[in-house]
Image: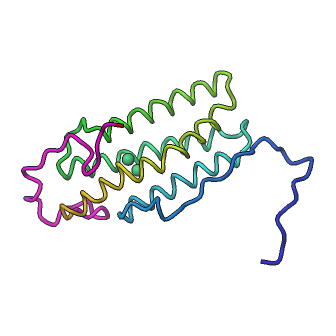
Amino acid sequence: MSHTAPAHTSDTPATQATQAMAWTPSLNTGDARMDETHQEFVDMINQILATPEEAQLPIYKAFLNHTVEHFAQEERWMLATGFSADNCHAEHHATILETMRVVEAHYLDTDKQIITRLAEALAEWFPGHAASMDAGLAAHLKSVGFDSVTETLADPSVIQNVTMSGCGSVSCSS
Ligand SMILES: [Fe+2]
Ligand SMILES: [Fe+2]
């Protein structure tokens, strides 16, 4: 790489001082399909943070749709492997989605900085969620022989007596 980074010139909008969120090995959950979705999630946060605030809405809407799918995917896997529908991991997802929808409304109303603030907050929130609830789910999927690519259990009888209201291997106290 011989060329240098572009200089920050005065005609470049300097509205985005935020650092990009790096993908680090600590974000890996042990489930490749989940990790792929998570990499997309991180990429979209970075895309938002690299976009001037007045142009963020279309990216934000795509990010919200992606997050709906991301969370629905995990919740589908939970239901397929013995979690009750009202488990606390799903409740955490619902809280995040509710916040994301409120943020869209506030952005449309008057607050053009709120999407940036939320993206920063999600960048802070995500590593903890990935390392606890998502990694716990990934470990549970492995332990019951669930294939997240085909979304099938090697032996469906293994979860007949499993009813989980918690988050798998992690506590729900947070
Ligand atoms: Fe996740
Ligand atoms: Fe999750």
Instruction: Farthest residue to the bottom: give it.
Output: 2
At 65% from the left edge and 53% from the top edge, which residue is drawn? 20
Please indicate whether residue 17 sits to the left or right of residue 96 in the image: right
Quadrant where the N terminus sits is bottom right
Residue 136 sits inside the magenta stretch: no
* Residue 111, placed above or below residue 73: above
Residue 34, image x and y in percent? Answer: 39, 58
At 38% from the left edge and 62% from the top edge, which residue is drawn? 33
Please indicate whether residue 19 sits to the left or right of residue 70 in the image: right
Instruction: Farthest residue to the top: give it.
Output: 109
Picture quadrant where residue 119 is located: top right
At 20% from the left edge and 51% from the top edge, which residue is drawn? 80
Main SS, magenta region, reads loop
* Residue 36, placed above or below residue 169: below
Residue 52, image x and y in percent? Answer: 74, 42
Q: Which residues are magenta?
A: 146-173
Residue 73, image x and y in percent? Answer: 34, 50
Please indicate whether residue 137 sits to the left or right of residue 124 in the image: left
Picture quadrant where residue 148 is located: bottom left
- In front here: 173 or 87? 173
- In front here: 21 or 94? 21
- In front here: 141 or 168? 168
Residue 107, image x and y in percent? Answer: 63, 28
Quadrant where the C terminus sits is top left
* Residue 96, placed above or below residue 150: above
- Colour setting: rainbow
